[in-house]
Amino acid sequence: MKKLLFILAALLMASNVMAMRTVVFRPSVDKNEATGGNVTNGSYTLSKHGVTITVDLGSITNDQYRFSAYNESSNNTIEVAPSIDWDVLYEGEYGVFYGRLQKIEFVCVDSGTYGPGNLDALGNMPGGDYSSSGNVGVFDAEGYNTREYYYFKANSEVRCTEIRVTVYADPVAPEYNYSDALNVSGGDIQFTSSGTYPWITVESGGRTYAQSGNQGVASSSSELTATVNLSQTYTLSFDFKAWGEGTSYDRCIFSIDGVEKFSYGARDNDWETYMVDIPAGNHTLKWSYVKDSSVNPEGDYFAVDNVALRIPLDKALNVTGGNIHFTSTGTYPWITIESGDRIYAQSGNQGIASSTSELTATVSLSQAYTLVFDFKAWGEGTSYDRCIFSIDGVEKFSYGARDNDWETYMVDIPAGNHTLTWSYTKDSSVNPVGDYFAVDNVALRIPLDRALNVSGGNIHFTSSGSYAWYTISSGSRTYAQSGNQGIASSSSELTATVNLSQFSSLSFDFKAWGEGTSYDRCIFSVDGVQKFAYGARDNDWETYKVDIPAGNHTLSWIYIKDSSVNPDGDYFAVDNVSITTKPVIRGDVDGDGTVSINDVTELINVLLNGNTASLNLSAADCDRDGKVNIGDVTVLINYLITGHW
């Protein structure tokens, strides 16, 4: 038996009256387009505006002006099978339709003597709810809440120059979950849309989003609204597509409290991001798609996704008390993220090939400062995706993939006006794990040398690595502290190299706020020799002094953390580092300012263990022969007995 199956998708329009849709097929033309020529055996499919005709046949006439499905051995039967699922959303060339099936009508045009004649029920058609007359068959579906197939049959050969299928639907307001579709993960903004053409939710291209519901409807509007109550200023961000005819015709409008923020017509076929700051208070957000009286452009909708209220860039990026102003615009602006105990900013072009996302700040410095910031570089590699930081257009670093943890970068900036730029540039392929550039804790700090030296001091300090030391101004102090606070299994080191022409005394203030010497350790060493290792001390400053002989020496302050527990404070802090030369007192071997039997003991111990490097040689060379040996012990003892050298 040859079958002609008319499978009707859900063509259901939301309106205040019964909606209808008629789809016309011209078999002689449509078949030729589908097959490229005559078909005498096999099958083919024709689809228009959501209605699909599948022809399953053993033979068919070669006459391109008629459509034949006649087989005497199969009782000359044609089956028309409209399958309607009224819970299905259909998005077609002429719009989006939703409703409850009411009636299906099938008309064979210009059939002549080859029309369907008397149509009868067949298959799952509910009895008594069908009718036919000549070349017209009607099924009344009202009252039948079922998703079964419905069939008509005809007892004669059918030849139609046109086949018209009309579906009638009674609108049913859909229940869309706008919150799930529009909010970012964890967001809780509540959205509403009503009226004749409410917004709909769509799943496409890995996204679930909302779009206007008046596609293809002239002189109409479709609105989506949300009301927010903000305790402080937030940055509203959302992705959108504007596929209207143009701002003078169809318009995609976003407004806050009735004040228009943008009005776009056609933009392009990709998503872009919009951001705007909103002050504290109650506010109404509105997205509208307003269509004029003619022309339905390609696309023909306003779509929105990933709506979020985010901490503003300035608040997210500055350290406490910082006042640097940051900006990010363009198609893919940077966004702020709250994760764990951090609020930071990251590039907005994640997963978007051949794109750039840029963050900028302009600073005016009255003196030299050290710029410090934390960052994550999660690109594909410097030859592909690049995380770039530059000052005044001069690149300071360009990283691809680094690792999955934060690290700290520091650079000195001279006095003057400067532009800071962080950009994430992606190549044309491959989206790596992470796929972003993230920045946090941006600060302009007093340089280490100025913070650590006493007035007039000139010791040069350095700190690098993932967790560099940084300077802090608090109360009357400007000091430096370790940069690995709260980071398990890490170390942060500060170093200085000094060249002393004579025996000197090193002095500095410090705070040791580790967990304990068996866990977190605050260590100071000279030339790799540990001078102290403290864990928790107290919450006030104390002073440490140590004598250092003439020569070149490396000073190191390091905070080493174990794999667990972050104590209160959790840092090593240093201030007021100074080196003063000590007056040479002949025989004062231990450097306490007096000559006593203790100096004899100290000198003998040094000679026995063979380590004279730490001695003040000028003081220990009691016999003034340029060497320190047992002869100096004899001279020192004689001095203590006689009082004369």
Image: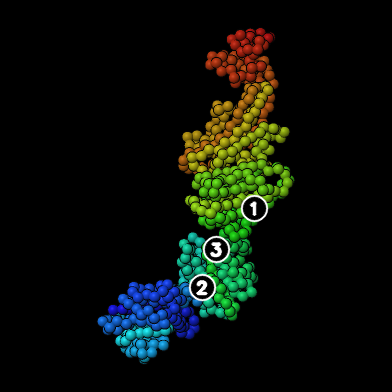
Task: Specify the quadrant of the image occupied by residue 523.
Answer: top right
Residue 199 numbered mark, or none: 2
Name the one closer to the observer, 105 or 440.
105
> Marks 3/2: CA distance?
18 Å
Point 63% across, 45% down: residue: 395
Q: Secondary structure under badge 2? A: loop
Residue at mark 3: 271
Q: Residues within 10 Å of mark 2 (few under 14, many from 20)?
A: many
Which residue type does callout 2 highlight? Trp
- Residue 594: percent from the left, percent from the top? 65, 18
Q: Earlier in the sequence, mark 1 or mark 3?
A: 3
Point 62% across, 36% down: residue: 462
Residue 560 in the figure: left or right of residue 620:
left
Q: Secondary structure under badge 3? A: loop
Name the one closer to the observer, 409 or 449.
409
Residue at mark 1: 360
Q: Where the C terminus falls, by quadrant? A: top right
In this view, the mark in front (3 or 2): 3
Residue 108 seen from this side: yes
Residue 63 numbered mark, or none: none
* Color scheme of the displayed model: rainbow
Q: Residues within 10 Å of mark 1 (few under 14, many from 20)?
A: some
Rendered position, 356 above or below 123: above
Task: Specify the quadrant of the image occupied by residue 496.
Answer: top right
